[in-house]
Image (spheres, rainbow, N blue to C red):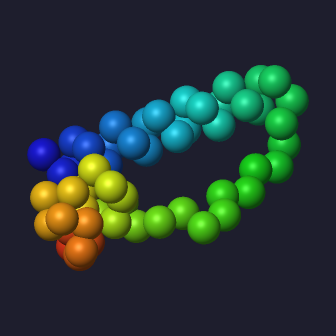
């Protein structure tokens, strides 16, 4: 399940970067990207107090 999720995220990133390149964008900066396990979706089950180490 996690492998499928990671694969889907990677595929979406690649598709979106390809679209940006077709539009003429040549440089992209990803700044302050949080660990996936610390997003609200994953921390809500812990009352937002801890990150999901497997997320």
Observer able to see residue 17: yes
- Above or below, 4 relative to 23: below
Where residue 54 appears, x then y in whole percent?
19, 67
In the picture, residue 35 is in which quadrant?
bottom left
Q: Quadrant of the C terminus?
A: bottom left
Front residue (pair 2, 42): 42
Front residue (pair 32, 6): 32
Observer able to see residue 55: no
Where residue 42 appears, x then y in whole percent?
24, 57
Where residue 15 appears, x then y in whole percent?
55, 30
Residue in the picture at 66% in, 31% down: 18
Give the side of residue 36 with respect to residue 31, left or right.
left
Where residue 23 appears, x then y in whole percent?
81, 24
- Above or below, 20 relative to 26: above
- Above or below, 44 relative to 54: above
Q: Kindly give the residue lying farthest to the front in the view shown.
A: 47
Give the side of residue 17 with respect to residue 50, left or right.
right
- Above or below, 16 relative to 40: above
Instruction: State how many labels appear.
Output: 0
Residue in the picture at 13% in, 46% down: 1
Give the side of residue 11 with respect to residue 38, left or right.
right
């Amino acid at each position: 399940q996690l492998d499928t999720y990671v694969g889907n995220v990677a595929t979406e990133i690649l598709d979106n970067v390809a679209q940006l390149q077709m539009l003429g964008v040549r440089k992209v900066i990803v700044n302050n990207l949080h660990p996936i396990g610390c997003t609200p979706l994953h921390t809500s089950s812990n009352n937002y107090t801890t990150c999901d180490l497997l997320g």
